[in-house]
Image (cartoon, rainbow, N blue to C red):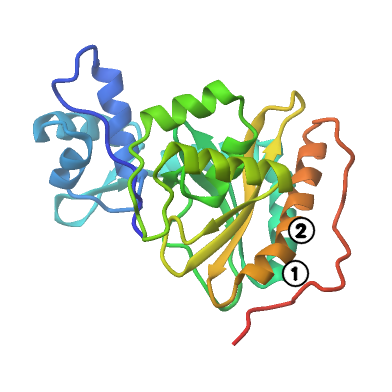
Amino acid sequence: MPNTVNTRSSEQEPGKGPVDKAMEVLEALVRTGGPHRLGEIARRTGLTKPTVHRHLRTMADYGFAQPAEGGSYRAGPRLLGLAAAALDAGDDLRLVRPALADLRTRTGLLAYYAVRHRSTAVLLEQSEPVRGYRMSTRPGGETPLYCTAAGLAMLSALPDPEVAAVLEETQLTALTFRTLTEPAAIRAELGRTAERGYAVDDEYHEQDVRAVAAPVTDGDGRVVGALGVCGLTFTLDPESAGLFGPMVRAAARTVSAGLGSGGPALGVVKDTAARGGERA
């Protein structure tokens, strides 16, 4: 499913300065990969084509954007280098990557790590199986918190005022026939998530796709992200979700312990019932 996060900006928005507009152009440039034509970036940001073109030329001078075929632009080499350096510098990803590889191997599913940005979950890392489901969202892509496993996992560990703020500022749109769109229903789901320690996206975000995720916290107990696995519903059925949920929860707690959250390092759960791959 394509990203479902609406753009918020417009040329006429009060208080929007040149830096704000440049950041929106940069975000639109890298959000879904590239290259992107000038008109597409203007549409996504709500800015005029001359404004977008001016910012892109400046970014190209600094290596943050790169002209491509047909007058389009893609992310530049300097931007890609800075992004790679920032990811490599993060303690969380150094701990997350082996956890994702382990989850992928033990479940046969796609394993992923996402972080919160306002009312969205941003995919940072994924470990894909040799065969099976591939996420339509790529690293850097955003999905809503209220209808994804990673989002529900993070929301379940947030203070109630933050949850209320997210639900208030989010357009609770039905993306599938199973999406929860009533705040009371979402809060009930968050209660179940907090009780068991992991969230289940039961076709809430994408039809025929199920996901399981658990929150990751830092040394102060603050939510920094969520680990999860996802697959097609015939592969990740309710029984499998109940089996893999504790594995994901244990992996998230191990990463959290590595970040200094104070909880015991649970390590890899030796579950003899673990399944090693996708079912036919």
Whether 46 is drawn above or below 204: the answer is above
Question: Can you say which quadrant of the picture contains the C terminus?
Answer: bottom right
- Closer to the camera, 104 or 25? 104
- Verify CB contact (< 8 Å) between mark 1 and mark 2: yes
| Whether residue 277 can be seen here | yes
Whether 16 is drawn above or below 6: the answer is above
- Classed neighbour count for the residue bearing mark 2: other residues with Cα under 10 Å, few (<14), some (14–19), many (≥20): many
- Closer to the camera, 242 or 75? 242
The residue sitting at 33% across, 28% down in the picture is 23
The residue sitting at 56% across, 47% down in the picture is 150
- The kind of secondary structure element at disc 2 is helix
- Give the farthest residue toward the bottom: 280
The residue sitting at 15% across, 31% down in the picture is 47
Report which residue position mark 1 lands on: 106
Whether 135 is drawn above or below 80: the answer is below
Q: Which mark is residue 247?
A: 2
- Image coords of residue 85 (percent x, y): 58, 39
Q: Amino acid at mark 2?
A: Met
- Image coords of residue 254 (percent x, y): 81, 45
Q: Amino acid at mark 1?
A: Arg
- Image coords of residue 34 (percent x, y): 31, 53
Q: Quadrant of residue 265?
A: top right
- Closer to the camera, 164 or 104? 164
Q: Quadrant of residue 70?
A: bottom left
- Image coords of residue 98 (percent x, y): 74, 55
The residue sitting at 53% across, 56% down in the picture is 201
Question: Can you say which quadrant of the picture contains the N terminus?
Answer: bottom left
Instruction: Say whether residue 182 is left or right of residue 104.
Output: left
Rounded to the nearest angstrom, the CA distance separating label 1 from label 2 is 9 Å
